Image: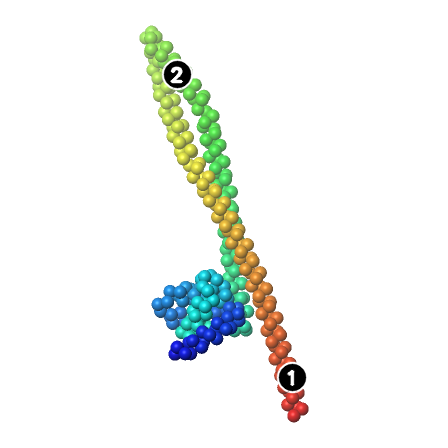
Amino acid sequence: MNNSTKTHLQAKLSKNWELIKDRYPIVVNPDAILDDAVQHDVLAYFDGLKSSEEIRVYLTLNESESNMIFTDLIRAGAIRFLEDVERPKYLKQQNIELKRNYDFLFSEKNRLAGENLYLEGQVKEKEAILSEVESKIPENQKILADFNQKTEQLKGAPDHLFQDNADLLYIKNEMADKEEKVSEVLVELEDGLPRLIRRKLKLGEMIERAGDNVDQREQESKDNRRRLSSYRDTIDELRNDLLDTKSRIRELIEES
């Protein structure tokens, strides 16, 4: 295409932009564009169901830039615009895809809610264990203090008390080991509890985002059903007009 023809086509597109921006472009041959990054971005965003105006806004292009890009893409044979009779089929395909995405998001939302309930139970269980261990620490400390006191008293006792002293020392060491294990359990619980809480909060955010996505897909599905109904009405009107025209032609032929 020479420069004169290209300029003429650009002028024609610019003049009819109000009509063009409501058309739906689809990719015919993406390999027709080689080195133009903006045109590649435009093609990457096409799915046959976005109007030219939506694409222009998405790519933050002004009207003149949009006209030039669409002119170049049409000239290169990379895109074409959907005919009205084709659009119901594409809308039906998108509705099927939206339904599939909705079912997946709804299932994922339920799964995340179930995992959230499980984690809440885990957090409560760990908190209960931590509370029980903490409640026993004063009692164990008192027992250990009593044994320490008795040990000090037995240090100066007669020989017949040496065996009792040895038994008490053994108990003291055993209690010290138990206290050390209790301390380790406390440290482990204190380290694990924040992680569980953070994970619970993160799951809450994911559930909220999943709910937002489900609502968005429901709205898109409603919009497409409305569009499909409108296109069907338009096709019915065109079919009736065609029948009327045929009837009128037949009458004119008979009159002549």
Q: Earlier in the sequence, mark 2 or mark 1?
A: 2
Report which quarter residue 187 is drawn in: top left
Where does residue 45 sit, x and y in percent of width and height?
A: 44, 63
Image position of 56 with respect to 146: above or below: below
Farthest residue, direction left: 159
> Residue drawn at (45%, 74%), measured in percent from left and top?
10
> Residue drawn at (45%, 68%), measured in percent from left and top?
64
Report which quarter residue 133 is drawn in: top left
Please, what secondary structure does the residue beneath circle 1 have?
A: helix
Which of pointers 2 and 1 indicates the residue nearer the eye?
1
Whether residue 86 is visible to the viewer of this picture, yes or no, is no
Q: Which mark is residue 151?
A: none
> Residue drawn at (39%, 28%), measured in percent from left and top?
183
Q: Which residue is nearer to you in this view: 171 or 138?
A: 138
Quadrant location of the N terminus?
A: bottom left
- Mark 2 Cα-neighbour bin, 10 Å: few <14, some 14–19, many ≥20: some
Residue that carries the numbered disc 1 in the rendered image: 247
- Asked whether the residues under the numbered discs 2 and 1 touch, taking CB atoms below 8 Å apart as contact, a structural biologist would say no
Where does residue 11 sit, x and y in percent of width and height?
A: 46, 74
Q: Which residue is nearer to you in this view: 23 or 15?
A: 15
Q: Which residue is nearer to you in this view: 220 or 131?
A: 220
Where does residue 223 sit, x and y in percent of width and height?
A: 57, 62
Where does residue 256 sit, x and y in percent of width and height?
A: 65, 92
> Residue drawn at (53%, 70%), measured in percent from left and top?
18
Residue that carries the numbered disc 2 in the rendered image: 147
What kind of residue is marked 2?
Answer: Phe
Whether residue 2 is visible to the viewer of this picture, yes or no, is yes
Farthest residue, direction bottom: 256
- Mark 1 Cα-neighbour bin, 10 Å: few <14, some 14–19, many ≥20: few
Image position of 7 with respect to 113: above or below: below
